[in-house]
């Protein structure tokens, strides 16, 4: 073959740079390329790998003396066909076998460094083995055969090192992603905590305001009742203070809190308010959001007894039903309006359930067959005692 011109070498270098650039582009986007075009993930990965190997081997091969030997002996067409065949063999055998080995459970248990060393050695070995029949078919000169093996070794090492580099970059990217996710999780947790604390801080003064008004009214006419109400109020706020760092409460404690409120109202309105609480030991330890019973109880008293002035019968019922916790607050006061326009207290129930039991609850305001507010929590959480 005639000695290649300087221009020919320049063209080879430009083509090599272009092929390397394309190969790097495909490597950088390995996990996303052709996702919308090729549905089968195995086929998609093999197509991308085939293009990458074709680009890198096409860029490296012209830099060897073997390249010009093959052109002079077989021509450009045979060179092109041979390149496609070797690239296909590298992809189907070397890549898939290497991928299988790298994903093996025993390999994954090793350190990152050991994993990648094994992968690099496997890549080098497979490329040299795959190149062996092609080498003996193409070359009849021992020097060229030796050089072909050396080229295969370097090519395998380069591919392996590129794989290690990309794996390391993916690892670092995953670490950064995990750190961001952890930070977002912490921020969401802090946001949830802040929102719940805001809800609690607004409810507690509301309790205090109503209770103190009742005590102020009774302190003028009946000191004993005022004292009882003060004790009930102290019990109520002792419960609140003792559990101020917790967003959940047991059914037992939540019922006790609601009863403290009702005792205050019972002392004030005497026989005009009657209440009954039904529960069982079976469900007393299950958890629910703090202070979601009180707004329902307060509404029942306000819209029943206070609005009508008549005797109000109020019933609180808690039970387990179809693996759900069901809380009912029923009264014989005026029916709920067709369109509920919740005030702050009722809205806080939805807010707390959204934060603590997202997509796992329902709240209903029913007039038939009985007027009742019904809360159903579909995720059971039990306050298990520690041993």
Image (spheres, rainbow, N blue to C red):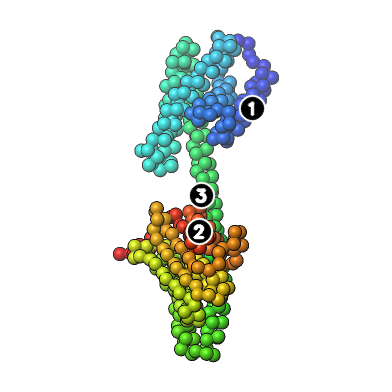
Q: Quadrant of the C terminus?
A: bottom left
Mark 1 Cα-neighbour bin, 10 Å: few <14, some 14–19, many ≥20: some
Residue drawn 46% across the image and 23% down it: 92
Residue 51, image x, y percentages: 56, 25
Residue 274 drawn above or below residue 87: below
**Who is closer to the viewer here, 41 or 66?**
41
Look at 59% across and 67% down and name the residue there: 344
Residue at (49% x, 55% y) in the render: 361
Q: Is residue 286 above or below residue 64?
A: below
Q: Which residue lies under the disc numbered 2?
A: 368
Residue 52 visible in image: no
- From the viewer's side, name the closer residue of 357 and 123: 357
Q: Under tag 2, what secondary structure?
A: loop
> Which numbered mark, 2 or 3, is in the foreground of this view?
2
Residue 202 visible in this rendered orientation of the protein: yes
Residue 73 image offset from top left, x and y in percent: 55, 9
Asked whether disc 2 touches disc 3, contact meaning CB atoms under 8 Å apart, the reply is no
- Secondary structure of the residue carrying tag 3 is helix
Residue carrying label 3: 178
The residue that disc 1 covers is 18
- The reply, left or right, for residue 117 in relation to residue 8 is left
How crowded pointer 3 is (Cα within 10 Å; few <14, some 14-19, many 20+) is rated as: few
- Vertically, is 311 above or below 351? below
Disc on the earlier residue, 1 or 2? 1
Residue 96, by quadrant, is: top left
Q: Quadrant of the N terminus?
A: top right
């Amino acid at each position: 073959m005639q000695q290649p011109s300087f221009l020919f070498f320049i063209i080879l270098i430009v083509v090599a740079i272009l092929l390397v650039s394309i190969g790097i582009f495909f490597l950088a986007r390995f996990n996303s390329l052709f996702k919308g075009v090729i549905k089968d993930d195995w086929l998609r990965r093999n197509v991308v790998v085939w293009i990458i190997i074709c680009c890198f081997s096409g860029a490296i091969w012209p830099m060897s003396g073997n390249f010009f030997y093959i052109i002079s002996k077989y021509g450009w067409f045979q060179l092109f066909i041979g390149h496609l065949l070797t690239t296909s063999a590298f992809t189907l055998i070397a890549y898939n076998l290497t991928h299988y080995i790298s994903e093996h459970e025993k390999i994954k248990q090793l350190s990152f460094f050991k994993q990648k060393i094994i992968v690099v050695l496997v890549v080098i070995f497979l490329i040299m083995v795959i190149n062996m029949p092609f080498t003996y078919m193409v070359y009849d000169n021992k020097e060229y055969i030796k050089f072909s093996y050396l080229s295969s070794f370097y090519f395998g090492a380069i591919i392996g090192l590129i794989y290690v580099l990309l794996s390391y970059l993916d690892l670092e990217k995953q670490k950064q992603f995990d750190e961001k996710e952890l930070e977002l999780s912490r921020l969401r947790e802090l946001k949830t905590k802040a929102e719940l604390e805001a809800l609690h801080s607004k409810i507690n003064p509301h309790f205090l305001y109503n209770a103190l008004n009742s005590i102020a009214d009774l302190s003028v006419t009946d000191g004993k009742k005022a004292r009882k109400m003060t004790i009930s109020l102290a019990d109520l706020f002792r419960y609140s203070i003792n559990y101020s760092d917790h967003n959940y409460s047991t059914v037992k404690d939540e019922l006790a809190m609601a009863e403290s409120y009702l005792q205050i109202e019972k002392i004030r309105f005497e026989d005009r308010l009657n209440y009954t609480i039904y529960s069982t030991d079976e469900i007393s330890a299950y958890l629910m959001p703090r202070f979601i019973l009180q707004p329902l109880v307060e509404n029942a008293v306000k819209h029943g007894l206070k609005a009508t002035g008549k005797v109000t019968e109020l019933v609180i019922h808690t039970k387990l039903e179809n693996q759900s916790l069901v809380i009912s607050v029923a009264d014989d006061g005026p029916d709920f309006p067709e369109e509920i326009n919740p005030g702050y207290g009722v809205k806080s129930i939805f807010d707390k359930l959204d934060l603590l039991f997202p997509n796992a609850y329902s709240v209903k305001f029913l007039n038939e067959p009985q007027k009742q507010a019904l809360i159903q929590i579909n995720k059971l959480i039990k306050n298990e005692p520690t041993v």
